[in-house]
Amino acid sequence: MIETEIIELKGGAALGYRHLLGNKPPWLVVIQGERGYLATEYLNKEFVDRIGDACAIVEGAKDFDDMLNGIVSWVSKEAEKLGVKVGMQGKDALRLML
């Protein structure tokens, strides 16, 4: 099952989607802004950097609230160029990628 939701933030909106790919966690949770996205640790960080995506990882998130309120643990090179930093709250990182 895939859940989707429009995430409204000051400065714009983003599309969130959540999917349990196997029979048990971890969940794949992504909130897509216009210039980049927040994601769970499910994604391969080296690949994200290699293809030039702006991405910030929030580990352990199970839903959209966890992503927005969690702390960014990894940032791609492209996301760094947008001002996203490790240690930021997810919603602050996402605002920079809207």
Image (cartoon, rainbow, N blue to C red):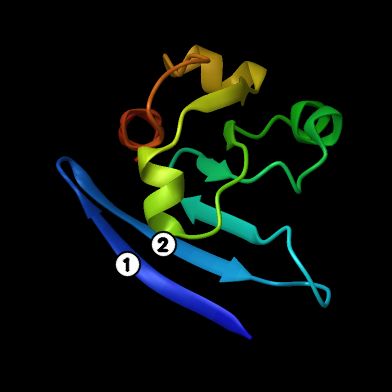
Residue positioned 32% across, 67% down in the render = 6
Q: Which residue is mark 1?
A: 6
Question: Looking at the figure, which quarter contains the N terminus?
Answer: bottom right
Local crowd at mark 2 within 10 Å, few (<14), some, or many (≥20)?
A: some
Q: Where on the picture, by quarter, is residue 19?
A: bottom right
Tell me the residue that label 2 is attached to.
15
Q: Outermost residue, front direction? A: 24
Does the rendering let one see residue 62?
yes
Residue at coordinates 42% horizontally, 57% vertically from top-left?
Answer: 64
Q: Which mark is residue 36?
A: none
Residue drawn at the location 78% of the way across and 34% of the way down: 51
Image quadrant where residue 26 sits: bottom right
Q: Amino acid at mark 1?
A: Ile
Give x and y (percent) for residue 36: 51, 39
Circle 1 Cα neighbour tier, 10 Å, few/some/many (<14 / 14–19 / ≥20): few
Nearer to the camera, 38 or 53: 38
